Amino acid sequence: MQDTGSTLPRRQLGRYLMDWRTRAGLSQPQAAQLLGIGSTSLYRLEHGQNGKVNLGHVEAACELYGVPEHLVAAYVGLARQTSEKSWWHEFGDLIPENFDVYMGMEAAAQTFTSYHPDLVPGILQTADYTRVLVREALPDEAPAEHERRVQMRQYRQMIVTRKRRPVEVNVVLHESVLRRTIGDGKITGVQLKRLADMSTRPNVTLRVLPNEAGVPGGHSVGQFTILDFGANRVGGLVEPPVVYVPGIVGGMYFEKPKDVHRYHQAYKAFQDRALDAVDSRGLLRQVAKEFLQ
């Protein structure tokens, strides 16, 4: 049964702790015994079902599992987050800027539904496309750090291409994404060709919203992603769907049903005005050729 008291920061914390326990080769009862807490308490911690997270338990678990120090700080920050159903993750005070909360959610999702008016989504980017964006965003970082970020984003794409239960991807791209040069013509053309190729996969649906479609729904809407986590064996939600809206200093997360519904409505409005999958693929290949000439 879904725990209605669970919140996104708690669920993310639990997901990370469970992952590190597994890496340490410990079963839940073994870890609970070593931590000196009940197995039920550890279960609730790992599933984000605590009314209030015990920081001592989090720190002790991190020590037991050998979690690196910089991640311990991030996990403690998650434990201290508000219990509100809408959550603003601002970098700096509680969670380090180099810790990507969203990436953990994306990896656990079964369905990725997204609208992009400016850029290709990260899970579909080529390495060169990502490299240009990273260098633009972080000009003061060392080249080695740029490359680490590029490789991390490439690694994330395994959720789309893996053989066992790949994530279902539904993306609407505004036509302006296709026309915007990122880096140079070759980088952009190769990226568009990659999108066309990826759209042939059975788990990927990619549609282009043409310029002449106007403003579906009548509202100016920026980039957003809806993550769904599927159902359990009895038909209940594994966890509530989440809407992620990125920002330059952090990200906004919504999980109230009415908020998620509004974003689903916005996505449907874009989808209804978009080209179908075949025409979208054709346009991607056409514009790719123009860039690569």
Image (spheres, grey):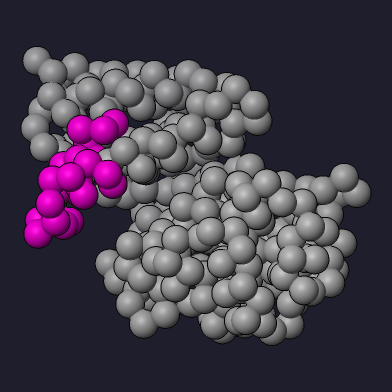
Q: Residue at x 36, y 71 (%)?
A: 96
Q: Position of residue 8 (x, y in %)?
A: 60, 68
Q: Position of residue 140 (x, y in %)?
A: 9, 59
Q: Is residue 225 above or below residue 75?
A: above
Is 123 on the left or on the right of 38, as rendered? left
Is 118 on the left or on the right of 280, as rendered? left
Q: Is residue 191 above or below residue 226?
A: above
Q: Residue at x 61, y 47 (%)?
A: 23
Is 280 on the left or on the right of 241, as rendered? left
Residue 213 seen in this snapshot? no
Q: Residue at x 63, y 67 (%)?
A: 61
Of residue 11 and residue 255, the one placed in the foreground of this image is 11
**Image quadrant for the C terminus?**
top left
Residue 10 belongs to magenta span: no
Classify residue 208 by image quadrant: top left
Q: Is residue 142 above or below residue 42?
A: above
Give the magenta range. 126-149
Q: Position of residue 178 (x, y in %)?
A: 25, 35
Residue 179 seen in this snapshot? yes
Q: Residue at x 11, y 37 (%)?
A: 183
Is 248 on the left or on the right of 200, as rendered? left
Of residue 20 and residue 237, the one placed in the foreground of this image is 20
User: Residue furthest toward the front?
Assistant: 34
Magenta-drawn stretch, dominant element (helix, strand or loop) = helix
**Image quadrant for the N terminus?**
bottom right
Of residue 279 and residue 163, the one placed in the foreground of this image is 163
Q: Position of residue 114 (x, y in %)?
A: 47, 47
